[in-house]
Image (cartoon, grey):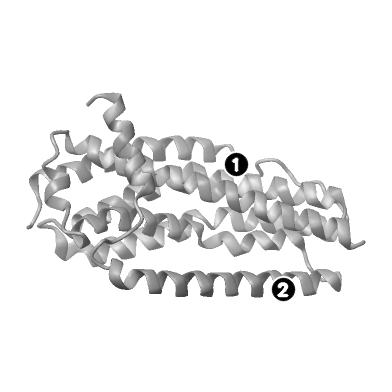
Amino acid sequence: MDSAIFRNLVRHEFKFKGSYKKSSRSQAAGKWWLAYSLLILLMLTGTATYYAMHNELQINSIWFVTMGFPYMVFFLSYGCMKREWENETYGWWLTMPYPRLELVSAKWLGSYLKVWVGIIAVFFATSAYVLILSMVLPFYTLESVGSFMITGINWLTLVAGLSPIIIALGLLASAVQSSVYRPISPIMWIVFMGGIAMIFQIPDSAISVNMMQQGTGHLKAEWFPYSWELPLFMLLSWILTYALLRLTAYLLEKKLDL
C-alpha cells in the first residue's frame, strides 16, 4: 500500500465520529452525554477544591480518577471495529484493495493517536488545575506541583506504553464477535478485563508511594518508580501487539461469519 493511502486511512479512523445509522438519535444522546460529563467533571473539581481549601487533599490522589483509562482505551478500539458492522460498511471496508493487516493497522494507529491526544489533554488540564491551587492556597507549593506532574508522567507513560496491546485486544475482541469463533467471546472478555486489571495494579502502588512522601513532607516524587522488568515487559507487549494484529487480520480474511 502506498504510504499516502495508508495515511489517509489513518486520518479517516482518527476523525471517525460514530455510527451513521444512529445519527438521527445520536445528536440528542451526544448532547446529554456531554452534559453529564461536564456535570461529573464539575462535581469532581468542586469536591477536590473543597478538600484542598481545608488542606485535606493529597494532590497526587487526583490521578486515581484516571485509573479507568486502560478500559477506556479498550472500548475505544473495540468500538472502532464494531462501527463497521453498525454502519453496515464492513463489506465496503473489507473489499478495499488492500491487505487486511494494513486495514487493521490503520484502525490501530488511528486509535493510538486518539489515546495520545487524550493523555496529553488530561495531563495539561490537571497540571493547570494543581498549579492554580498552588497559586491561590497557601497549603500547596510549586514543589508539590512538580511532584504531581512527575507522578502523572510516570502513570501516563505506563498507559501510553501499554495502550498498543490494549488497542490490539479491543480490535481482536470485536473481530472475534464477527467470526466463527463468536461462542468464545464471553471467555475472552473475562480474560481481557481481568488481565488489564492485573497489569494496572502497578501504578496504584507508585502513586501511593508518592502520596506517602507528601505526607512526610518530602515532596520530591521519584522518576519512573517501577522495576527494571517493566521496560522489558513493555517491549514484549509491543511484539505481542503485532501478533494480535496479524491474528485479527487473519480472522477478518479467513474466519468471518457473515
Q: Classify mark 2: residues with Cα within 10 Å, few (<14), some (14-19) or many (20+).
A: few
For mark 1, what is the residue? 227
Q: Is residue 2 left or right of residue 73?
A: left
Q: Residue at x 81, y 46 (%)?
A: 220
Q: Nearer the viewer, mark 2 or mark 1?
A: 2
Q: Would you call the spot at circle 1 few (<14 residues within 10 Å), some (14-19), or many (20 or more)?
A: few
Q: Earlier in the sequence, mark 2 or mark 1?
A: 2
The residue drawn where x is 59% and y is 75% is 39
x%, y% of residue 216? 86, 58
Q: Observer-nearest residue: 93 or 105? A: 93
Q: Report which quarter residue 52 is drawn in.
A: bottom right
| Circle number at residue 46 | 2
Q: How many marks?
A: 2
Question: What's the residue type where badge 2 is placed?
Answer: Gly
Q: Check disc 1 and give the amino acid type.
A: Ser
In screen coordinates, is 44 left or right of 131? left
